[in-house]
Image: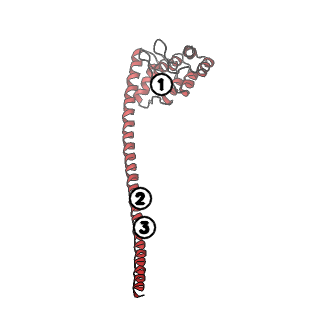
Amino acid sequence: MAVALLLHAAAIGDAEGVEEALGVGADIEQTSSTGATALILAAQGGHAAIVERLLACGAYVHTRTKAGDSALHWAAFKGDLASVKLLLDGKDGLVATKPSCIEAIRAVAAGGEPARAKLAEELEQEAAETAIKLEAERAVEIQRQAEREAGEASARLKREQEDAEEDQIEEDERQRILAEQEAVRQAELARQQVRLAGE
């Protein structure tokens, strides 16, 4: 019930209905029979305020309908530049910076299936390039982390060795003192035995 309310409210731009559905725990990623999420339906209807609200709630921007359309495709198709910007700049959103990608968005705003397909192609290509860049950055960070951990491990081992050496020095000193004390005791015993023998 809550999901149906959310989908319907998003489709017609009913902000109060969206808030009501979210308030009762509606699944923001649930889809309609066509595979459209509330975010996609809001974009289809050109409801930028609803798009913004759903994004703020963590709506996933990459979901596509059974026909292969994303919220961004619909926002661009409708010429809803406010929603396009929100979807491009939102959390986990797509990042369109290449001139060809931006041009594809403009073309989609003018309408037409070929333009929508071109936009999808451009976005997927840019997403792949971004993924490669992020993977390279992650690899560098992993290497740096490994180096940091190796350095910390080396420093820890050095400290442990130094502590062990100090402990050994202390133990050697303790044994030396005990040996001296034992020698003194033995000497005293020997003197006592000599005195007893003389008596």
Mark 3 or mark 1: name the one nearer the start of the chain.
Answer: 1
Identify the element where label 1 is drawn.
loop
Describe residue 83's horizontal placement relative to residue 188 as left or right.
Answer: right
Q: Place residue 138 in its image quadrant.
A: top left
Give residue 159's mark.
Answer: 2
In this view, 127 is above or below 73: below
Could you tell me how far apart the alpha carbons at marks 2 and 3 are, in whole angstroms?
16 Å
Around disc 1, counting alpha carbons within 10 Å, would you say few (fewer than 14), some (14 to 19), or many (20 or more)?
many
Mark 2 or mark 3: name the one nearer the start of the chain.
Answer: 2
Amino acid bearing label 1 = Val
Identify the element where label 2 is drawn.
helix
Around disc 2, counting alpha carbons within 10 Å, would you say few (fewer than 14), some (14 to 19), or many (20 or more)?
few
Residue that badge 3 annotates: 170
Residue 112: % across, % down: 43, 15
- Residue contact between numbered discs 3 and 1, judged by CB atoms under 8 Å: no
Amino acid bearing label 2 = Arg
Residue that badge 1 annotates: 61
